[in-house]
Amino acid sequence: MTIAGGIVAVILAAGLVSAGPALAATTGTALKNDEIKSEPFRDAKVVGSVATGDKVEILDQRGGWFQVNTARGKGWIRMLSVRRGEARKRSGEATDVFGLATGRAGTGNVVATTGIRGLGEEDLKAARYSEAEIKKLESHAMTRAEARKFAAEGPLASRKVEYLAAPAAAR
């Protein structure tokens, strides 16, 4: 399997999980200065901003983004820029750096992984197959020849990635 094939497999697997129910409105605090976007996309139009310590009302969640309402605007902000509830007092730079380096933070030593953060047990239990989302994902697929041409245009190297073992039920 090529890297491009592996990425498509991961994207297809992600398409099987629906976003889950909307959040009940809750409060949060901006952890850093960031832009508020019109949509939950990095390249969406900027409609406002938050500053470190600003209070936000979290209205919804989509992927790695929170929809927020703030004194400075309403829109979407990256989840990693907001802490639900009150911001904790900093315990010291060394602790913060260690937390960033290890991916572990908080009293529970929870590991946060971008791209997965925000999907809780309830979201996974409520996930449903969506044929429309699968078709949307498949519309972005490319042939092996198209992938090779794309890789050749940029200095990308091909690497072999082994397939995962089939689940026991599928064997």
Image: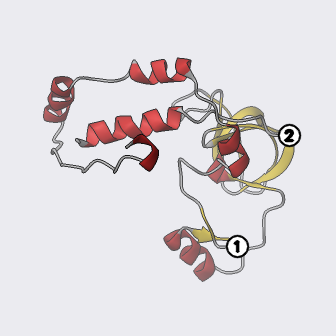
Dividing the picture into quadrants, the one containing residue 145 is: top left
Instruction: Compare residues 8 and 71 and report the one nearer the observer.
Output: 8
Instruction: Compare residues 94 and 129 and report the one nearer the observer.
Output: 129
- Three-letter amino acid code at disc 2? Ala
Dividing the picture into quadrants, the one containing residue 158 is: top left
> Residue 21, image x and y in percent?
76, 35
Residue located beneath label 1 in the image: 108
Q: Write the residue at 29% across / 37% down.
A: 5
Q: How many C-alpha atoms fall within 10 Å of the one at disc 1: few (<14), some, or many (≥20)?
A: few
Mark 2 element type: loop
Instruction: Compare residues 1 and 92 and report the one nearer the observer.
Output: 1
Mark 1 element type: loop
Residue 33 seen in the figure: no
Q: Is residue 60 left or right of residue 46?
A: right
Inter-mark Cα distance, 1 to 2: 24 Å
- Looking at the rendered image, the quarter that the N terminus falls into is top left
Q: Write the residue at 15% across / 41% down.
A: 155
**Mark 1 vs 2, N-terminal side:** 2
> Residue 14, image x and y in percent?
51, 37
Residue located beneath label 2 in the image: 24
